[in-house]
Image: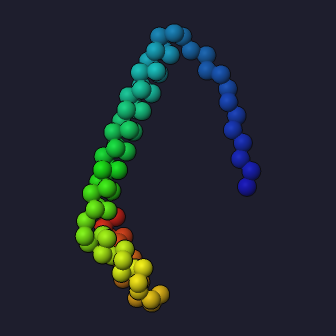
């Protein structure tokens, strides 16, 4: 599947560029804040005994026994 991206210059006034810059900066800060929060929650989850126990059980379990373990892991991710 081929994809193409066409870029056209945007004709703006100086004040419009200032507004866009401010809004993009706000969006960038919001994105970084949400990403930071999600990463902290993930790190806390990884440190729990339950998570580490599930990961070890998955490694040592046979193929047919893994399905319920993966379901429990998926619940933790939620």
Which residue corresponds to the image point at 67% horizontal and 30% vertical from the top-left?
Answer: 7
Residue at 40% across, 79% down: 58
In the image shown, does 76 or 19 lie closer to the viewer? 76
**Percent position of residue 13, x then y:** 54, 10
Using the image, determine if residue 3 lies above or below residue 78: above
Q: Residue furthest top?
A: 14
Whether residue 72 is visible to the viewer of this picture, yes or no, is: no
How many marks the image carries: the answer is 0
* Quarter of the image that includes the N terminus: bottom right
Against 60, residue 42 (above or below) is above
Give 7 or 66, whichever is nearer the viewer.
Answer: 66
Q: Residue at horizontal 26%, vertical 72%?
A: 50
Point out residue 67 in the picture as x, y percentages from the top left corner: 41, 83
- Quarter containing the C terminus: bottom left
> Which quadrant of the figure has residue 59?
bottom left
In x, y percent, where is residue 30?
36, 36
State whether residue 70 is above or below residue 33. Answer: below
Which residue is the extreme one toward the left? 49
């Amino acid at each position: 599947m081929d994809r193409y991206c066409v870029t056209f210059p945007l004709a703006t006034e100086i004040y419009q560029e200032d507004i866009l810059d401010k809004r993009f900066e706000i969006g960038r800060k919001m994105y970084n804040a949400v990403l930071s929060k999600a990463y902290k929650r993930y790190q806390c989850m990884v440190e729990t005994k339950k998570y580490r126990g599930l990961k070890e059980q998955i490694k040592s379990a046979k193929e047919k026994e893994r399905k319920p373990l993966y379901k429990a892991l998926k619940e933790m991710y939620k």
